[in-house]
């Protein structure tokens, strides 16, 4: 299937999970197809990076479900200095989007609950913070055991569709990642009614493990509706080891929030890649 | 004596006694200080490469001889460590108040913020599950403020209202700034000055703080690096001097 075929299966108002994290292995070719589509009012669940930023500036987002939106990790190494996403900031500060904030671990639990068909999973995370003030969806639950502890009941984050980008996949939807981290992509697919995998290269099933150990074969075809071959499909985000972040295009993205012209120039440059 | 080196030593001291846990400092000087602690008096600490591995290397940012992996630690595995409590994280903070409540989400009204920041990130989970410290490279009254706009990281006044085991797991150990080492070792866990960096007065630290700091009668000076620590800083951990950019000389 093509990126356009995948996006044609989405509907306005849907809740869409987007894989990767920050500016790492985001399914940006599928995101670009959403930008070009007539879709609106999407709820986006993401470990946020340019995926959410782009969709905000394109006017596609009704609600963001997230723990952070950043091009990269905050200063764990000097190369990755902490930077904020200008498109998301603009949308939030203008009051253009609704906002369901969570702690990043809660997003994991919400996806896991959805994948396991549970209404919630209990956690301490969120207790004492302003999450209960800022996210009215959150409720607490009391342990039925002797401890009687009050915990947060992290609600299932059920997705209408998940979009992820993997290094290699076969035609049926089995897929491997070749970089250092699977992120939460397999979980997003399991939490979703429909799953779409874009990939650098479609290979024969027999070749899936040519470049990877068996434990990298994380994506189960039972959760995949369609596979889209798009070399460079994560750009401008990284897709290690196939490529690093496209710094030129990423810089254009970062600058594009400032003016309407900048936004159009970024879309043109992105399309030309 | 360079201020950045004093800060790195102060960060290292924050991890003293932690033993065999993940020291997870975020930021340039925190990473340098964490590596320094492990290379000297706290050898059992575990540390990340900033990506998906725990590594044994002393080098802070570049590993020309290759990384020595101790554990594959993808993003999702970090929560096993955090929620199990074997971790001491040092986070940044756009705002911190006198009880150690932290804000990295948004400035102003959360519903329509004046300035959208990172988001809640991992702060709520960190602060009720493992030891947390904060790093403030440029202390001002805007950062050390009277009241944070959004509580992302939980401070002591709110932790006192937590019940069950959650309260046991909460500890905000230190706030390291470019001026001083601050902690919460007071009867009501209000922030106090623990030590002043060499050449800084208590009045200067108070002036860069929007609330009243507790000032002990006997106020020590932050420890200066030993010769061996200087060697490690300049030759091994951060030979390019990235820390000197984070806290430049006045």
Image: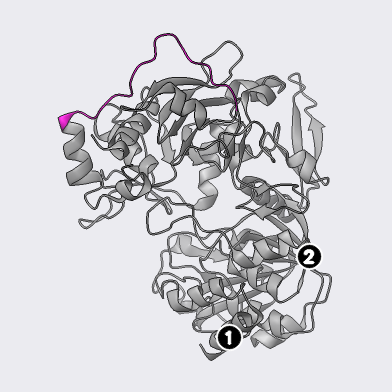
Chain for numbered disc 2: A
Q: Is residue B178 visible?
A: yes
Residue A273: image x %, image y %? Answer: 51, 87
Residue A96 numbered mark, or none: 2
Residue A35 numbered mark, or none: none
Residue placed at 46% from the left, 12% from the top? B216
User: What is the quadrant of residue B196 in the picture?
Assistant: top left
Which structural element holds mark 2? loop
Residue B47: image x %, image y %? Answer: 37, 41
Residue density around tag 1, few if under 14, some if 14–19, many if 20 or more, within 10 Å = some
As displayed, is residue B204 above or below residue B67? above
A35 on left or right of B229: right
Give the mark nearer the N terminus: 2 vs 1.
2
Q: Which residue is mark 1?
A: A265
Q: Closest to the observer: B223 or A240?
A: B223
Quadrant the N terminus of chain A occupies: bottom right
What range is drawn magenta here? Answer: B211-227
Q: Closest to the observer: A114 or B221?
A: B221
């Amino acid at each position: 299937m093509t990126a356009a075929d995948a996006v044609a299966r989405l509907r306005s108002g849907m809740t869409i999970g987007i894989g990767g994290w920050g500016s790492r292995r985001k399914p940006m070719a599928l995101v670009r197809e959403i930008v070009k589509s007539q879709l609106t009012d999407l709820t986006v669940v993401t470990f946020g990076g340019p995926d959410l930023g782009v969709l905000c500036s394109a006017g596609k987002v009704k609600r963001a479900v997230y723990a952070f939106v950043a091009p990269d990790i905050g200063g764990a190494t000097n190369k990755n200095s902490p930077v904020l996403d200008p498109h998301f900031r603009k949308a939030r500060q203008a009051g253009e989007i609704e906002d369901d904030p969570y702690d990043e671990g809660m997003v994991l639990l919400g996806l896991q609950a959805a994948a396991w068909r549970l209404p919630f999973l209990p956690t301490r995370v969120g207790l004492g913070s302003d999450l209960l003030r800022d996210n009215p969806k959150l409720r607490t639950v009391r342990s039925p055991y002797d401890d009687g502890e009050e915990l947060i009941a992290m609600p299932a984050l059920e997705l209408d569709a998940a979009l992820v980008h993997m290094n290699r996949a076969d035609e049926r939807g089995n897929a491997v990642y070749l970089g250092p981290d699977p992120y939460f992509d397999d979980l997003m697919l399991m939490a979703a009614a429909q799953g779409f995998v874009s990939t650098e290269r479609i290979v024969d099933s027999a070749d899936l493990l040519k470049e990877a150990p068996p434990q990298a074969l994380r994506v189960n075809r039972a959760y995949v509706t369609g596979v889209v071959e798009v070399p460079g499909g994560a750009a401008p985000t990284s897709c290690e080891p196939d490529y690093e972040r496209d710094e030129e295009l990423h810089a254009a993205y970062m600058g594009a929030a400032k003016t309407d012209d900048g936004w159009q120039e970024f879309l043109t440059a992105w399309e030309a890649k | 004596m360079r201020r950045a080196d004093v800060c790195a030593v102060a960060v290292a001291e924050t991890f003293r006694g932690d033993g065999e846990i993940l020291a997870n400092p975020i930021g340039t000087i925190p990473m340098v200080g964490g590596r320094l602690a492990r290379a000297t008096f706290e050898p059992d600490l575990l540390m990340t490469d900033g990506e998906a591995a725990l590594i044994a290397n002393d080098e802070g940012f570049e590993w020309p001889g290759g990384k020595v992996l101790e554990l594959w630690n993808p993003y999702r595995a970090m929560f096993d460590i955090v929620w199990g409590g074997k971790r001491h994280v040092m986070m940044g903070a756009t705002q911190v108040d006198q009880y150690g409540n932290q804000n990295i989400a948004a400035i102003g009204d959360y519903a329509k913020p004046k300035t959208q920041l990172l988001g809640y990130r991992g702060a709520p989970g960190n602060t009720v599950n493992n030891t947390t410290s904060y790093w403030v490279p440029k202390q001002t009254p805007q950062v050390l403020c009277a009241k944070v706009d959004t509580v992302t990281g939980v401070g002591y006044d709110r932790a006192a209202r937590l019940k069950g085991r959650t309260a046991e797991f909460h500890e905000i150990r230190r706030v390291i700034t470019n001026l001083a080492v601050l902690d919460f070792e007071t009867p009501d866990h209000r922030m106090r000055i623990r030590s002043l960096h060499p050449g800084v007065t208590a009045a200067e630290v108070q002036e860069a703080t929007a609330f009243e700091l507790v000032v002990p009668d006997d106020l020590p000076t932050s420890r200066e690096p030993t010769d061996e620590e200087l060697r490690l800083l300049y030759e091994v951990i951060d030979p390019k001097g990235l820390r000197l950019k984070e806290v430049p000389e006045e």
